[in-house]
Image (tube, helix red, strand yellow):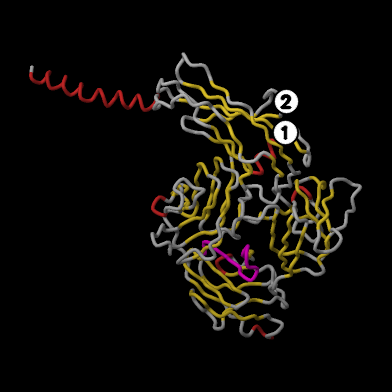
Amino acid sequence: MKTIYNLVIGILLVLPSLLVSCKDDYMETNLGNQPLSLSVSSQKLLLDITAPQSNAVTFQWTAGSNFNTNAAITYTFELGLSGSNFANSIKTEQGQGKNSVSYTTAAINEILIDQFGVAPGVEAELEARVTAKVHNESIPPQVSETVKIRVTGYKPVSSILYLIGDAAPNGWNADEATKMNTVSGAAGGFVWQGKLRAGSLKFITTPGQFLPSYNRGSDDTKLLFREDESSPDDKFTIPTTGIYKVSVNIISLSIHIEALDAPEYSELWFVGNPTGWSFKPMTADASDPFIFYYNADLSAGGEFKIATQPTFDQSTVFLRPETNGHAAGKNQNVVKWSESEKPGGANDYKWNISGGVYKIRLDIRDMKIDIIPFTPYPVIYLVGDATPGGWSIDNATPMAPLSGDPYKFSWTGTLNAGEFKFSCDKKSDWNGDWFLASQAGIEPSGDAEQMIFSASGSNPDNKWKITSPGTYIIELDQLKQTVKIRKQ
């Protein structure tokens, strides 16, 4: 009997707290009898194409009244063309306690053009209202007075840009045009760095389509936007083959093409006993054309050297060690040799390594080579505000290893707008090993792309940038130092 008594008392003690919890979910303190009123931060807007992510306008309203019922209030905000009686309007549902709606410059411009059909450069009058719904069946909705705002939009520019021409990597093939990288924080800005051939080039916005395009303007520093065949089809001229940095802004219609310090060789080949003396192409670094990599399973071991062309012709220049039979190691000196320069094969030195998996890094600027045995990291992690764990290294998001391959990892999940990179060891002092993007602020291409490996700290601190949130599939190969970041 005493047990039953205690149980009843316990239920009575717990019940009020349960009722309070339910009340918190559905009720709101008395808001009095104030009217619902809507205001706007500015009544006339001339949208600025150079600041698409800036806040353009904010609509704000009072709470309205729940007429002493303590019932919660939610809101519906509407934005439409003036005089349309809110037909084809934008509707935004706002929860309890949410009393404002803001639009960026790009967002309100898109609404003007795509939703309301207003031509760029034409001033349009919009109207807005808000409806308050009291969650009590006896109280009808409250509707604010309409506020009006006059807005002039702009013609949006492309968010992507491609190189095309006989000077470009893929020639005049519009289907395979070379994508440029967006410049973080610079509206309309794009940049690309790499090898260009002697020839001509221009820029297109859509793969497979030659129009619209950006061509040479009045001089080599200006662009011309070409919408149809009636406009001049002048191109930019690249005088000699070499490494170039191309920077453009399609809002200011400006361009700068800069010739960079170029290496003596743009291609190199690994050849030796580990490959059965067949020539295997080395990988040029995406950000530094003087750096080459060869990362592979060289389990056969033995001698090797590096060729400047895939042939044993007497004129072929080989890169080799200072002394014959040099083993693996860091910061070794490299010298050039060819049979035609050394009759009889003298000084045909080679490196000699034991069998294993190696990462080889060759710098032909300083003529140094690193030949390092590679042990794979057991886990690779995503870190950044685009990832589920944010910038907390302790909450870094692990990738899943592929069965039977210790070098490959995959991950599928949601990426937010923001940046990220890959941690190899999740060191709390941030001085661990990292895989980084080839350039700062680069957007994933969806195809396999090269990564930079940085030991003992993230340098250079290049991160990938996600501008389109959603579900992504990431496939990473830590041996080949490649990654594919593809949106589903």
Residue bearing mark 2: 83
Q: Is residue 166 magenta?
A: no
- Residue 193 at what x, y percent from top left? 69, 63
Seen at 61% across and 84% down, the residue is 347
Residue 280 seen by the camera: no
Please state if 360 lies on the left or on the right of 364 as rendered: left
Seen at 59% across and 45% down, the residue is 486
Q: Which of disc 2 and disc 1 is earlier in sequence?
A: 2
Indicate the quadrant containing the N terminus: top left, top right, bottom left or bottom right. top left
The one nearer the camera, 436 or 150, is 150
The one nearer the camera, 335 or 98, is 98
Say above or below: 108 vs 171: above
- Residue 473 at what x, y percent from top left? 54, 44
Q: Secondary structure at mark 1?
A: strand
Q: Amino acid at mark 1?
A: Glu
Please state if 108 lies on the left or on the right of 66 as rendered: right
Mark 2 neighbour class, 10 Å CA radius: few under 14, some 14 to 19, many 20 or more: few
- Pointer 1 and pointer 2: residues touching (CB < 8 Å)? yes
Q: Residue furthest top?
A: 138
Q: Amino acid at mark 2?
A: Gly
Residue bearing mark 1: 125
Indicate the quadrant containing the C terminus: top left, top right, bottom left or bottom right. top right
Q: Secondary structure at mark 2?
A: loop
| Magenta segment boundaries in residue numbering | 285-298
Separation of marks 1 and 2 at Cα, in angstroms? 9 Å
Seen at 79% across and 61% down, the residue is 167
Mark 1 neighbour class, 10 Å CA radius: few under 14, some 14 to 19, many 20 or more: some
